[in-house]
Image (cartoon, helix red, strand yellow):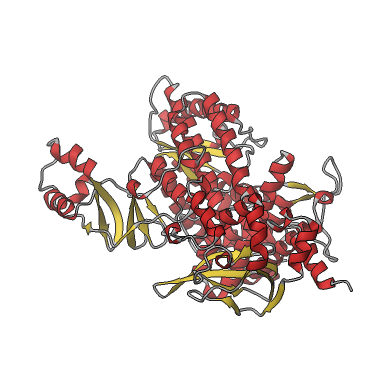
Amino acid sequence: MKNTIAERIQDFLKNYPPFNLLNKEDLFSICEQVQVIYLEKGKFIFTQTEATHNMFYITNKGAIKLTQIENEKTNIMDMCDEGDIFGLRALILKQHYYMNAEANEETIVYGIPADIFEPFVEKNKNIKNYLITSFASNVKDPSIVEEKGNTSSYIKKESNNDLFNLQNAKYTKSPITCDLTTTAKNIATTMRDAKIGAMVVVENKKPVGIITNKDLRDKIATGDFSLECPAKKIMTSPATTLPKHITIPEAHVSMLKNDTSHICITKDGTPNSKLIGILSIHDLVVSLGNNPSVLIKETKRAKKSKQLRSIRKKIDLLLKQYLEQELPFAHILNIISELNSAIVTRSIELCLKKMDTPPPVKFAWMALGSQGRREQLLLSDQDNALIFEDVEETKFEETQSYFLTLSDKVVKYLNTIGFEYCPADMMASNPKWCTSLNNWKKQFDEWIFNPNSSGILLSSIFFDYEYAYGEKKLTNELTEHLLNSINQNNRFLTLLAKDIIEKPSPIGFFRQFIVEQDGEHKDFFNIKIRALMPLIDAARVLCLSLNIKNANNTLLRYRKLAELEPQNEDLYQSCERAFRTLLKFKTEQGILHNTTGKLIELESLSKAEKLKLKRAFKPIKEIQELLIHRFALKQIL
């Protein structure tokens, strides 16, 4: 008699790694032993410190939330959707669980017996590497891995692999600090006695600067400042900050980007929250080879566009490698964004050297759109702008002319590297988008106080800007002005919200994909316009309505919203998860077909891929319903 349950399980597992690496007969033999587990929302499949089960798991339907309790606070570590595996400690370490696994909604998971699966791991190198990488990306301290069976020994053998270094960076907790008035003599004495290389300067428990041995050498030993001068005169400010859950590559990339050997670890990763630790360059393990750290160094040393173009190609290979290894997508996004930003920064530096004279006033280069949100993984067209200090009216034309020349050089330089020109000319080489701070304020006010369809479209692009190079105070002042103006005209946010809910739906009444009806892309599905943009736009308008600063990234926006509105936490987490799934899918399609990935040929997708896409669409309708209620849109629809 046929085992129809095992066949259904096989039909599911064959679409996902590492099971897709098995032959049909071996997979079916495993499926006959698989346990089907149904969980209601809030039910746990295992809990932190609980002894490992004799199986690991894969999500069939629903979602499993992986959390960790630390200092009585529950931190969300990951969300396992359809096809995601978890609970690998049963297969690798056979130690107590490090996290809780809780059903985030009604969920079905398959339990894979560890003893049944382990022989296939030992004889299949690809399965082994996949499981090692999946486990390593969630191990906080790899030194805890002991030789407990053949599988765990492979982790030690692979511990020098670049990918393994995506473990969390270890930092020094409860760092020694001083205040703004502490004298240089006292700081030096304390650092000597404590045998530390840096001291964080704090105000109201928040880091405002840092003093290192280098600062004492260059500023005090030289006689430039006296031993009695206060910390505020010799500190490096602002201090570079990161959150505690930071990986080794991300931390190292940040150090290289900011030219610092120390990073302050704060509660939320910004200078505006409590200091909880300090991370030094000596705390990091720097791998050799084609990794983010090396690419950042190469970028900083590059002197020609040819070198940067080569680095950009290496970034594409790194992205493909990370995706193939199924590493946490949030880490991939952070690392690739930092590498892209480093290339833009170096391009501006090289173009400045080609100018006949230094800049007449301070300026800031702004990345817009997906790059401004730090969500640009595949190369696409440029979206950028330039803002310069206000000058007298008689000097405006001359000043703008200088920066237009510079912008033209940078835009062309980026194009030679691989960043296409923006077809809508939303680039700093356009006089409209290369202007003074005061003119930028007027432009934002025009969009906000006199909204029309064109202004709403442009604001959705230009409000997602990130400082890329130059004087950061200019972009900070523009942000303050933007939020103040929005607070004076709530109608603008209402119109933004109305525009979001009027965007075309990804699926029709009968749950069929809504595809392009004509043109060269007829019957293709536009994942960017129909699925990603509603989530991006909703996060933006909600954050603007709550005056949330320094959160341009969509994933970060939803996390901030979940913190501020716990009553909507489940919805915001669903939106974050859906956005991550959709952006990853778009990126993989782009790599597969050598395109931007935004237009998808549905016939090329498997049934499982289509189902996963449709599942990610669910939060779109729910977040649009929240916007309708929040901005009272029923009255104007």
- Tell which of 598 and 29 is nearer to you: 29
Residue drawn at the location 57% of the way across and 32% of the way down: 430
- Tell which of 246 and 583 is nearer to you: 246
Residue 425: quarter of image: top right
Q: Position of residue 635 (x, y in %)?
A: 69, 70
Q: Position of residue 307 (x, y in %)?
A: 52, 26
- Tell which of 376 and 99 is nearer to you: 99
The quadrant in which the C terminus is found is bottom right
Residue 53: quarter of image: bottom right
Q: Position of residue 419 (x, y in %)?
A: 61, 34
- Up the image or down, 379 lies above or below 102; here it is above
Q: Position of residue 94 (x, y in %)?
A: 53, 68
The quadrant in which the N terminus is found is bottom right
Q: Is residue 550 left or right of residue 34?
A: left
Query: From this viewpoint, is residue 435 visible?
Result: no
- Tell which of 159 and 364 is nearer to you: 159
Query: From this viewpoint, is residue 487 visible?
Result: yes
